[in-house]
C-alpha cells in the first residue's frame, strides 16, 4: 500500500485533474490518494470566513460566487457525475445564511475544510469516470483530533483504528488532506499546508511502503528558486535533515510530516507532477547528511524585543510568562535570543495574531519591534555562504549552532 499526496497546485485546473488521474492510473493502483483544495481555494475560503464573521453580506456573496465559479469551470471541462459538489455548495450556502456561532477558529475550520471536500469530490468523480475503482473517503470520519481549531492535535489511537478499518488494500481511496474532526463531530483542520501531514498519518496507520508528494518542483532543492538563482536538487535526504529544513521553514514539506514516517522507516518521495517519470528526492534513513549548504528564506518577519519594566532579569519566571503569552496568541517563534535584561524573538508578521500579542506583552514589558525583516537559515553553513547571502543586507541578529546559522536581516536593496 502506498500513499500519494497531491497539493493545490497540482489540481488547480482541469488539466491538473487529468494529469493526477494519469499518474494514479499508471503508478498508483491500490493507493491512498490525499488531495488538497484546488489552486488557491484555501486562501479564498479564508477571505470568505472573514466576510462571514464580520457579516458583510455583499462580500460573502462575491467570495462564494468566485469560489463556486472557479470549481464549476474546472468541472465543465471534465466528464463525470459531479452532483456531490452541488450538495456541498448548497450546505455551505445554508451555513452562511445563519448567524455565526462559536469562536473564529472553529468557524474557520467549518468553512475552510470544504475546499478539500470539494476537490476530492471532483477528483473521485473524474477517476470513477475514467474507469478506476476510486472510493471517496471522508477524512473527517477517520482523523480524530482534539478541539484545537486550525491546529488540531491528532488522537493517534482512535485515528489508527479508524483508518485501518476503513481503508482496504484492494482499491484506490481518495481522501482529503488537512481536515479532521473532534470526538463530538466538529470539523477541525491541521494547520495551513497540513495535507502532507495527513498523508503521513495515513501512511503511519497503514504501515505503507512509501509516501509520494507530487509537487510543482522537481524534488527538494537546496534553496527556493523564488529567491535563489542557483539551486541544486537534493537526491537523498536523511529524516533528520528533512525535519530540520522543514522546521526552519523550507516550505516544500510540512514540518509535522516527517516524524511519523521516520518512526516506521517509511520513505518519503518528493516528485514532480509535471515530470512524473523522474525520481525526484527521497527522504529516508540514510547514513550521510547533506554535503552542500541549504538555504531557507523567510520574508515579512518581525523582531520583537522585550525589556522588563521593573528591575527584573529575563529569567525563568519572566520566560515562562512570555512563552505562555505566545502560545495563547498562537504565535510561533522562529528564533529567540536573550540577554540579562532583554529577550528578543523573531516571528512571522501575521496581522491576525501579532497585534493582539503585542498588546498583551505591553502590559508587562517595554516592547520594541522592527518589522519588514528577513530570516535566512543556512543548514551546513560556512563563512563564504554567510558572506554571500549578506550582500546588500544589514545584519540585525545572528545565531549559530554546529550545523545551522540563522541571520535576521534587513534588505538594503
Ligand atoms: N489546502 C490547505 C492549505 O492550502 C492544506 C494544504 O494545501 O496542504 O493550507
Ligand atoms: Mg494548499
Image (cartoon, grey):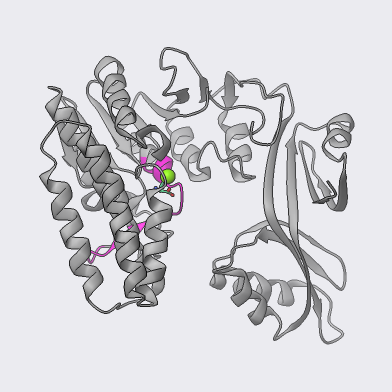
- Please state the horizontal and vertical placement of residue 370, each as a whole percent of the image: 78, 65
Query: Which sits in the foreground, 55 or 65?
Result: 65
The answer to whether 20 appears left or right of 162 in the picture is: right
Residue 320 appears in view: yes
The answer to whether 402 appears left or right of 77 in the picture is: right
For residue 192: magenta?
A: yes
Residue 190 appears in view: no
Residue at x 54% of width, y 36% of height: 252
- Above-or-below relation of 278 to 397: above
- Above-or-below relation of 307 to 263: below
| Residues drawn in magenta | 183-198
The answer to whether 143 appears left or right of 397 in the picture is: left
Query: Which sits in the foreground, 111 or 294?
Result: 111
- Please state the horizontal and vertical placement of residue 80, each as a whole percent of the image: 13, 33
Residue at x 79% of width, y 68% of height: 343
- Please state the horizontal and vertical placement of residue 139, each as a whole percent of the image: 25, 47
- Above-or-below relation of 197 to 61: above
In the picture, residue 286 is in which quadrant?
top right
- Please state the horizontal and vertical placement of residue 237, each as a whole percent of the image: 59, 25
- Image quarter hosting the N terminus: top left
In the picture, residue 360 is in which quadrant?
bottom right
For residue 404: magenta?
A: no
Residue at x 30% of width, y 63% of height: 110
Amino acid at each position: 500500500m502506498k500513499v500519494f499526496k497531491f497539493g493545490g497546485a497540482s489540481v488547480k485546473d482541469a488539466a491538473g485533474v487529468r494529469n493526477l488521474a494519469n499518474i494514479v492510473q499508471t503508478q498508483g493502483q491500490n493507493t491512498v490518494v490525499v488531495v488538497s483544495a484546488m489552486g488557491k481555494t484555501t486562501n479564498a475560503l479564508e477571505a470568505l470566513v472573514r466576510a462571514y464573521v464580520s457579516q458583510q453580506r455583499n462580500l460573502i456573496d462575491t467570495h462564494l460566487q468566485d469560489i463556486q465559479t472557479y470549481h464549476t469551470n474546472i468541472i465543465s471541462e471534465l466528464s463525470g457525475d459531479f452532483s456531490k459538489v452541488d450538495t456541498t455548495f448548497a450546505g455551505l450556502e445554508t451555513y452562511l445564511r445563519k448567524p455565526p456561532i462559536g469562536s473564529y477558529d472553529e468557524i474557520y475550520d467549518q468553512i475552510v475544510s470544504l475546499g478539500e471536500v470539494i476537490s476530492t469530490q471532483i477528483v473521485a468523480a473524474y477517476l470513477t469516470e475514467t474507469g478506476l475503482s476510486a472510493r471517496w473517503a471522508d477524512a473527517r470520519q477517520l482523523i480524530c483530533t482534539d478541539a484545537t481549531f486550525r491546529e488540531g492535535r491528532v488522537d493517534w489511537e482512535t485515528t489508527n483504528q479508524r483508518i485501518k478499518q476503513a481503508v482496504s488494500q484492494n482499491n484506490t481511496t481518495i481522501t482529503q488532506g488537512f481536515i479532521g474532526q473532534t470526538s463530538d463531530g466538529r470539523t477541525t483542520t491541521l494547520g495551513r499546508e497540513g495535507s502532507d501531514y495527513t498523508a503521513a498519518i495515513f501512511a503511519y496507520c497503514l504501515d505503507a511502503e512509501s509516501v509520494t508528494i507530487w509537487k510543482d518542483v522537481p524534488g527538494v532543492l537546496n534553496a527556493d528558486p523564488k529567491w535563489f538563482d542557483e539551486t541544486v536538487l537534493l537526491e537523498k535526504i536523511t529524516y533528520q535533515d528533512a525535519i530540520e529544513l522543514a522546521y526552519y521553514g523550507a516550505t516544500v514539506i510540512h514540518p509535522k510530516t516527517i516524524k511519523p514516517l521516520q518512526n516506521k522507516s517509511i520513505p518519503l518521495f518528493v516528485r514532480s507532477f509535471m515530470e512524473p517519470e523522474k525520481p525526484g528526492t527521497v527522504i529516508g534513513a540514510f547514513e550521510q547528511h547533506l554535503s552542500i549548504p541549504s538555504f531557507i528564506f523567510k520574508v515579512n518577519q518581525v523582531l520583537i524585543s522585550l525589556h522588563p519594566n521593573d528591575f527584573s532579569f529575563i529569567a525563568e519566571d519572566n520566560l515562562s510568562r512570555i512563552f505562555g503569552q505566545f502560545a495563547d496568541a498562537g504565535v510561533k517563534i522562529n528564533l529567540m535570543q536573550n540577554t540579562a535584561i532583554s529577550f528578543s524573538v523573531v516571528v512571522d508578521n501575521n496581522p491576525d495574531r501579532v497585534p493582539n500579542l503585542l498588546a498583551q506583552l505591553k502590559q508587562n514589558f517595554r516592547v520594541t519591534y522592527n518589522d519588514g525583516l528577513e530570516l535566512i537559515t543556512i543548514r551546513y553553513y560556512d563563512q563564504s555562504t554567510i558572506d554571500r547571502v549578506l550582500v546588500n543586507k544589514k545584519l540585525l541578529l545572528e545565531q549559530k549552532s554546529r550545523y545551522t546559522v540563522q541571520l535576521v536581516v534587513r534588505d538594503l536593496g
